[in-house]
């Protein structure tokens, strides 16, 4: 089981008792735009996903971790590596914090820093990328804080409430390898 510990938070592998949290996150229409979700998920599908969460990143091509502050409290958010490509040593990275109240408390920043370090130094990745809506200034600030650079814009990329929106591609290359 993966656990990455920071100063005020830790990242841990998903557990079966995360069912209600993951179900709530996947079905929260307020975050669908940032999570690229388009339809609701059933508890059955989320339960199946959690039952297969034991697969390692090389098998699943994805690593989803819960962002937590304390053993007694439920997860605050999720952070992912996706499209894991060990041949080319790259992966996508995404993060979502469930509660608006927790979004400006440095939780996302600490979680992102932990996962970047894990990706570069444990998985030996050469680069990470993030897809961010051009109007999502909070996420842009978070990722650029860690050196992600905008390398392009996908015009009219996502359809949100009948309006096409642009999405930027941000990339962080690890030049130390």
Image (cartoon, grey):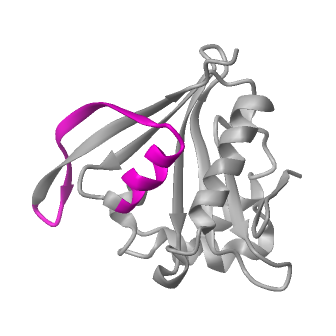
Residue at position x 72%, y 73% in the image = 18
Residue at position x 78%, y 43% in the image = 55
Asked if residue 39 can be seen in this view, the reply is: no
Query: Residue 45, position in %: x, y?
Result: 59, 63
Query: Residue 39, position in %: x, y?
Result: 37, 64
Seen in the picture, residue 89 relative to 5 is either above or below; the reply is above
Residue at position x 51%, y 63% in the image = 96
Location of residue 154 (image quadrant): top left
In the displayed orientation, state which residue is furthest to the right: 1
Residue at position x 35%, y 48% in the image = 132
Location of residue 76 (image quadrant): bottom right
Specify the segment rendered in magenta.
138-162
Q: Where's the C terminus, which quadrant?
A: top right
Seen in the picture, residue 12 relative to 56 is either above or below; the reply is below
Seen in the picture, residue 33 relative to 148 is either above or below; the reply is below
- Asked whether, in this view, residue 34 is left or right of residue 128, the answer is left
Query: Does the magenta segment cover residue 148?
Result: yes
The front one of 14 and 115 is 115
- Asked whether, in this view, residue 42 is left or right of residue 156, the answer is right
Query: Residue 75, position in %: x, y?
Result: 69, 74
- Asked whether, in this view, residue 121 is left or right of residue 161, the answer is right
């Amino acid at each position: 089981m993966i656990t990455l510990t920071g100063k005020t938070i830790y990242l841990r592998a998903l557990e079966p008792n995360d069912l209600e949290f993951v179900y709530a996150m996947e079905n929260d229409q307020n975050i669908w735009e940032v999570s690229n979700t388009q339809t609701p998920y059933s508890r059955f599908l989320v339960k199946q996903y959690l039952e297969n969460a034991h697969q390692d990143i090389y098998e699943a091509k994805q690593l989803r971790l819960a962002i937590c502050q304390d053993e007694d409290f439920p997860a605050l958010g999720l952070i992912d590596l996706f499209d894991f490509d060990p041949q080319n040593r790259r992966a996508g990275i995404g993060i979502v914090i469930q509660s608006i109240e927790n979004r400006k408390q440095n939780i996302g920043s600490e979680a992102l820093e932990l996962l970047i370090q894990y990706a570069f130094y444990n998985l030996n990745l050469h680069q990470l990328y993030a897809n961010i809506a051009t109007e999502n200034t909070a996420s842009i600030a978070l990722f650029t804080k860690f050196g992600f650079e905008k390398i392009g814009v996908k015009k009219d990329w996502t359809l949100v409430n009948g309006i096409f929106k642009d999405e930027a591609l941000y990339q962080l290359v690890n030049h130390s390898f």
